[in-house]
């Protein structure tokens, strides 16, 4: 016997009735109580995914570089005129796209929260926050590995990051909040409608073009410039990039505002996920 | 939500560990519609609209309806019923996998389950590593797993393979390891779902012994199984579910009798007596009766008694040395209890011209709590012409409630002291 007398009650509409703050504190409590599970899941997936192949490791290093080759090619041949980016273009696009990639991976991790647990989600009771944290940690650790390579490339181009790069884990938090906020809502919708999911993924990927990732923020096209100015990601990505390169950024105020909104969105999104989870789980049979 | 209650040092006997309060659960049959309802419910939830799940939308059905019971500390409740009657749904509700559509499920303490064998096992990790992984998923802390590690490995009988990747295990080893971990979790309520479906006899015995140990330590158990003897051995009371509704709650033997009766009734109510042929131009069967009345086209008798078949006929000619076939079978195509003809039993039957009564006395029907179909046929000598064929007479043999199994035997016992 466990000697534990905690009483648990299951009722219809239960999660719906829980207030925002209680939902949030429950989430934090669940993450703390399931920290060992998160650790075990992390060891399982991280080590196991690289245990197998030499190619697996190489791919993590090389794929970001392959990702930006097309942009570098277009720039070198004059097809793409990104404007003045301040540092050698390959370094710029590598840095920007890796930050962008991190944002997308936060989104994807959140979106796959439930499907990552397929199989034992229907049989065992455990806090699903553990899955979200685990997925996110996986995304972040994969990112760190490739980011180290990126830094190597930057050095090769004579670009040296500012010491404030140490703030990086803190700086990317708003990226996580925003990406996960959208991803969590999608995670629920995905179970109900896979078509919508695919369409949304495509559209979401297109935001790459309206964010100054492959071009300079001071874009020449006025219509594009307006979109860029209203895109919240602009502030996040530009600010992070600037801090890494120069230690400061003109976008910082915007960055703080967007961060606040992102955090709020995340809290709301978590509540939505929490309510819907109960209803969605049984559809996953 | 969760409330923390200080545990008192003395536990009274009526300490309720599980309360199922008027619980109902519905699902949707069609996947497409299910997705649509899922989307609809989610949007409504997001907009803050509280939902009433008491009506059935199109395609929905009740997997459980108005189930009500309590389980006290140290008690074992057996749950029986046909496949699809709601047993697994009930376990999932208690386990907290999804909420009920109506009613309330209250659980005191920690719940463990022998359901998810090898939940989260990673094929490339060793058994050792998987013990920690699986243990965490089941809610054990690292320290707890370390403490119980040796006991888990012993129970699983994996031996030196504990350091081999789980993908190299046989299915038996896989199951043993999964159960070994689950059974060591520190819990107040154990959910067991059909553990006899997997594992060899030695392992099953081990599981039962371990479960017995847990019982002695005050763990309450919900035991779902099709093994009736296991249910009788282990349960203090039994809940019999049929199509989501509780039919009976109480004495295990009574519950099982009721279950078997319903089981047979499903078949007998669907079957109809087929009077395929009743004669030819010379020979006619006028009536078929038994020493028990046919009520609602069904016949009920007690175990260990004779069943007499009486066929009244009328014939214009003599039919000598006929063959009278009787088949007693389970109410589904396939297995049968006995199929024989008078010739096999060295008995000759001569049906003389005029009106007569052909009787067959089946001595001491020692079936137990099971229904059967009776098929009757009469052939002429040489088996070239079938004179009579009626099939699917439904017979229910009511037996001894305290013994299980489909047959019944009188057993005498004797014990002598041997002086050395």
Image: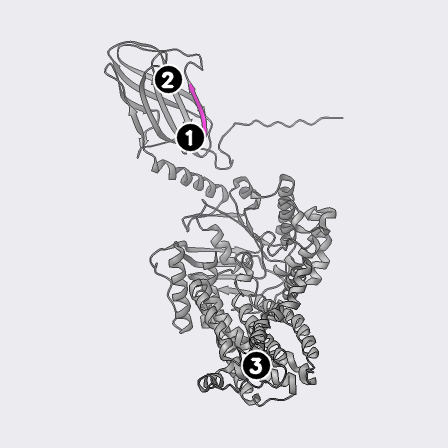
Q: Identify the image's colour scheme: rainbow, by chain, secondary structure or one colour.
A: one colour
Local SS, label 1? strand
Q: Are marks 2 and 3 on the same chain?
A: no
| Residue B212 in view | no
Disc 2 to disc 3, C-alpha distance: 92 Å
Instruction: Name the foreground residue: A196 vs B11.
Output: A196
Residue B71 spot, x, y in % from top left? 52, 55
The question of residue B375 being in magenta is answered with: no
Q: For the magenta stretch, what is the residue range?
A: B335-340
Q: Which of the two discs, 2 and 1, labels the residue nearer the N terminus?
A: 1
Disc 2 to disc 1, C-alpha distance: 25 Å
Q: Quadrant of residue B121?
A: bottom right
Residue, x 39% and y 58% (percent of image)? B32
Q: Vertical placement of A95 versus B207: above or below?
A: below
Instruction: Name the foreground residue: A129 vs B21.
Output: A129
The residue mark sitting in front, 2 or 1, is 2
Q: Quadrant of residue B110?
A: bottom right
Specify whether B58 is left or right of B214: left
The answer to whether the residue labelled 2 contacts the one labelled 3, judged by CB atoms less than 8 Å apart, is: no
Label number found at residue A237: 3
Residue, x 49% and y 67% (percent of image)? A187
Residue position marked by numbered label 1 in the rendering: B302
User: Please, which chain is the residue tagged with disc 3 on?
Assistant: A
**Number of residues whose C-alpha sits closer than 10 Å to that of mark 1, classed few (under 14), some (14–19) or many (20 or more):** some
Residue, x 38% and y 27% (percent of image)? B374
Residue position marked by numbered label 2 in the rendering: B324
User: Please, which chain is the residue tagged with disc 1 on?
Assistant: B
What residue occupies the far front of the structure in this picture? A77
Residue B404 spot, x, y in % from top left? 51, 36
Instruction: Name the foreground residue: A270 vs B211.
Output: A270
């Amino acid at each position: 016997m466990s000697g534990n007398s905690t009483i648990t009650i299951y009722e219809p509409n239960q999660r719906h009735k829980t207030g925002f703050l209680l939902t949030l504190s429950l989430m934090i409590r669940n993450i703390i109580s399931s920290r060992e599970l998160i650790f075990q899941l992390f060891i399982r997936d991280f080590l196991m995914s690289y245990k197998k192949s030499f190619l697996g490791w190489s791919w993590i290093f090389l794929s970001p570089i392959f990702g930006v080759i097309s942009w570098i090619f277009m720039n070198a041949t004059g097809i793409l005129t990104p404007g003045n980016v301040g540092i050698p273009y390959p370094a710029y696009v590598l840095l920007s796209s890796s930050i962008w990639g991190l944002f997308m991976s936060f989104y994807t991790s959140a979106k796959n929260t439930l499907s990552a647990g397929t199989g034992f989600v229907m049989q065992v009771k455990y806090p699903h926050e553990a899955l979200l944290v685990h997925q996110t940690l996986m995304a972040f650790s994969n990112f760190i590995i490739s980011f180290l390579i990126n830094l190597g490339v930057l050095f090769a181009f004579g670009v040296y990051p500012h010491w404030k790069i140490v703030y990086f884990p803190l700086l990317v938090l708003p990226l996580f909040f925003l990406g996960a906020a959208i991803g969590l809502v999608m995670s629920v919708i995905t179970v109900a409608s896979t078509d919508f999911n695919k369409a949304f993924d495509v559209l979401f990927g297109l935001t790459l073009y309206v964010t100054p990732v492959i071009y300079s923020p001071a874009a020449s096209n006025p219509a594009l410039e307006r979109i860029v100015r209203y895109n919240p990601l602009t502030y996040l990505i530009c600010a992070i990039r600037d801090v890494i390169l120069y230690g400061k950024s003109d976008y910082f105020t915007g960055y703080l505002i967007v961060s606040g909104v992102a955090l709020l969105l995340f809290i709301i999104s978590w509540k939505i996920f929490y309510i819907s989870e109960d209803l969605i789980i049984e559809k996953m049979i | 939500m969760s409330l923390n209650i200080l545990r008192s040092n003395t536990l009274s006997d009526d300490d309720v560990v599980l309360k199922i309060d008027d619980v109902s659960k519905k699902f949707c049959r069609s996947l497409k519609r299910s997705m649509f309802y899922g989307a609809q419910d989610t949007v409504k939830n997001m907009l803050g609209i509280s939902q009433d799940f008491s009506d059935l939308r199109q395609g929905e059905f009740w997997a459980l309806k108005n189930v009500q019971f309590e389980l006290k500390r140290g008690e074992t409740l057996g749950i029986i019923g046909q496949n699809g009657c709601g047993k697994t749904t009930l376990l999932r509700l208690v386990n907290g996998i999804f909420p009920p559509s109506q009613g309330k499920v209250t659980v005191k303490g920690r719940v463990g389950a022998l359901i998810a064998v090898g939940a989260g096992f990673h094929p490339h990790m060793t058994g050792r590593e998987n013990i920690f992984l699986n243990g965490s998923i089941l809610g054990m802390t690292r320290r707890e797993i370390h403490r119980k590690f040796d006991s888990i490995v012993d129970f699983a009988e994996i031996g030196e393979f504990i350091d081999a990747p789980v993908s190299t295990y046989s299915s038996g080893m896989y199951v043993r390891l999964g159960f070994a971990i689950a059974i060591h979790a520190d819990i107040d309520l154990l959910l067991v779902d059909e553990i006899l479906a997997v594992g060899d006899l030695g392992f099953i015995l081990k599981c039962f012994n371990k479960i017995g140990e847990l019982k002695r330590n005050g763990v309450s158990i919900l035991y779902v199984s099709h093994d009736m003897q296991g249910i009788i051995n282990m349960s203090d009371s039994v809940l019999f579910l049929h199509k989501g509704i509780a039919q009976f709650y109480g004495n295990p033997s009574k519950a099982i009798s009721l279950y078997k009766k319903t089981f047979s009734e499903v078949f007998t109510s669907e079957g109809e007596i087929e009077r395929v042929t009743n004669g030819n131009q010379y020979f006619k069967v006028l009536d078929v009766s038994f020493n028990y009345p046919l009520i609602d086209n069904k016949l009920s008798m007690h175990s260990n008694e004779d069943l007499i078949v009486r066929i009244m006929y009328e014939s214009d000619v003599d039919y000598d040395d006929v063959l009278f076939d009787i088949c007693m079978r389970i109410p589904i195509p396939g297995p049968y209890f006995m199929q024989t003809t008078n010739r096999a039993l060295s008995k000759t039957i001569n049906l003389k011209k005029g009106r007569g009564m052909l009787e067959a006395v089946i001595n001491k029907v020692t079936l137990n709590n099971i229904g059967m179909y009776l098929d009757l046929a009469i052939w002429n000598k040489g088996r070239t012409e079938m004179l009579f064929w009626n099939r699917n007479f439904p017979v229910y043999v009511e037996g001894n409630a305290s013994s299980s199994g489909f047959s019944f035997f009188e057993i005498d016992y004797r014990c002598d002291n041997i002086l050395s």
